[in-house]
Image: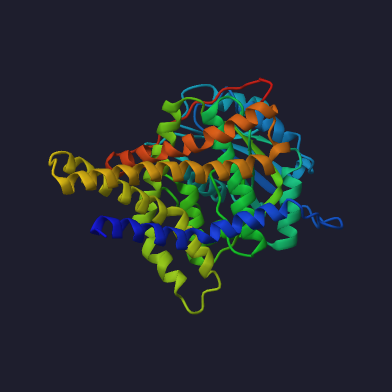
Amino acid sequence: MTTLEILNSIVLVIMTIALLYQVIFTIIGFLLKFYKETGKKEEGPYHRYAAIISARNEENVISQLIASLKRQNYPGELLDIYVIADNCTDCTAQVARDAGAIVLERYSDLKGKGYALDYFFKQLALNGKREEYTGYFVFDADNIVDQNFVRAMNATYNEKGYDAMTSYRNSKNFGENWISAGYSTWFMREAQFLNYPRSVLNTTCAISGTGFFVSEKLVKKNGGWPYHLLTEDIEFSVNCAINGDQIGYCKDAMVYDEQPTTFKQSFTQRLRWSKGFYQINLRYTIRLIKKIFQKDSRRRFGAYDLLMVTAPSMFLTLFAILVNAIVLISCLREPSYKSMLMIDYTKEYLLLSLVNFYLLFLVCGAVTIVCEWKKIRLDAFHKIVYIFTFPIFMLTYIPIALVALFKKVEWKQIHHFATDKPNSF
């Protein structure tokens, strides 16, 4: 066996062992589909919350989100709606005011949702209003919120006392094309087969950008929102794991998100996500590892889970592919007998890796779409088609992750548009 074959075998074994727990999560998530809760959940007291929307040039969609928050099945006087008009050059601020939101306009060279949220909490503190709220719901401007979202979150907060919670992330435009369907399937998988099992096993969950809750107690503890990497949501989740702050999950709270529909938009967004993961790897990997091995740590597995989510699979996959590709290219220049054997081996390895990658995510996509069938507003034919395109969507992460290794990446806006298409919310 050659050194390259040994290396490939080691990578395969490490990845299989390291990520085996996600197979267990998938089994638990599947079984939970057949679990029916008995009895009515006690809602307890109604707390006062603030909904926060960070928006940059979102005049097309902001009013829809505000309207859905106004329609909440929750006492209106206990839910204030704030919009941070962040470096806007359009009519976002005025549209938000007309829709009934409290608007804060921000202009700064420091761009990104993390900076906008930190600005909001500091402004609220200056006005002496932070103590009025039990916590905050954070949304993206393109969202639409299910009418029972706040009521469900409030009930879970009363029952579990989580200082942070994530929700079920559905899509407004699942059926737009294979790109929007790929995003949507991934977020549904994350909700049902990652966060739901995490909550049942009493470990910490991870928030993913929008539709999440954070308590005033935790905001105060953290000194506002000091998360400014390109993926501030995962940075927050990692910090919670390190600090022992459990993120919960509320399966009955649903938010509808608008997904990108062009590959250019998708490439830009996922390039930022990939670069953000690398930033987190550099800043937090050692601290996560220390947390895993702390003798008195009650959240060891949560730290391990977040470490697996942010680092090893991506790095090891890219490493193995790059090494084999370099060997293949090098051997092409030397047409000897040994070189031909190595060429055949590396070609077979790379092809088999792609096939296995496709089959793995074909199964993931199939299980997700079948289990979440009723939550997808789309005809049966297209649901089945998008099972087969989901692995292609995931395969495109490989070149994106490679580019992110070497390219400087900054936050760029993804434009959103109001829609009334049949497959939309």
Query: How many numbered discs, if any?
Result: 0
Residue 381 relative to residue 411: left or right: right
Residue 370 is drawn in which quadrant?
A: top right
Q: Judge left or right: residue 205 versus residue 399.
A: right
- Residue 357 in sight from this viewpoint: yes
Closer-to-camera residue (59/344): 344
Q: Nearer the viewer, residue 218 or 302?
A: 302
Q: Residue furthest right?
A: 39
Q: Give the farthest residue toward the bottom.
A: 295
The location of residue 306, given as percent across then percent down, is 48, 58
Query: Residue 376's image quarter?
Result: top right
> Looking at the picture, how far across and down is residue 266, in whole percent?
45, 31
Specify whether 81 is left or right of 325: right
- Does residue 141 appear in the picture of this structure? no
Q: How is the image coloured?
A: rainbow
Residue name at image x 41 percent, y 41 percent: 354
Q: Which quadrant: the C terminus?
A: top right
Query: Residue 372 location, x and y as percent?
Result: 68, 41
Q: Is residue 63 above or below residue 387?
A: above
**Image position of 347 with respect to 141: above or below:** below
At horizontal 77% and vertical 40% (from top left) the residue drawn is: 76
Check the image and report above or below for 7 versus 91: below
**Which residue reaches farthest front?**
337
Would residue 351 be found to the left or right of residue 174 on screen? left
| Residue 349: image location, x then y, percent | 34, 47
Q: Residue at x 37, y 38 (%)?
A: 400
* Quadrant in which the N terminus is drawn: bottom left
**Is residue 57 placed above or below 367 in the rendered structure?**
above
**Residue at the image position 35 percent from the left and 37 percent from the top:** 399
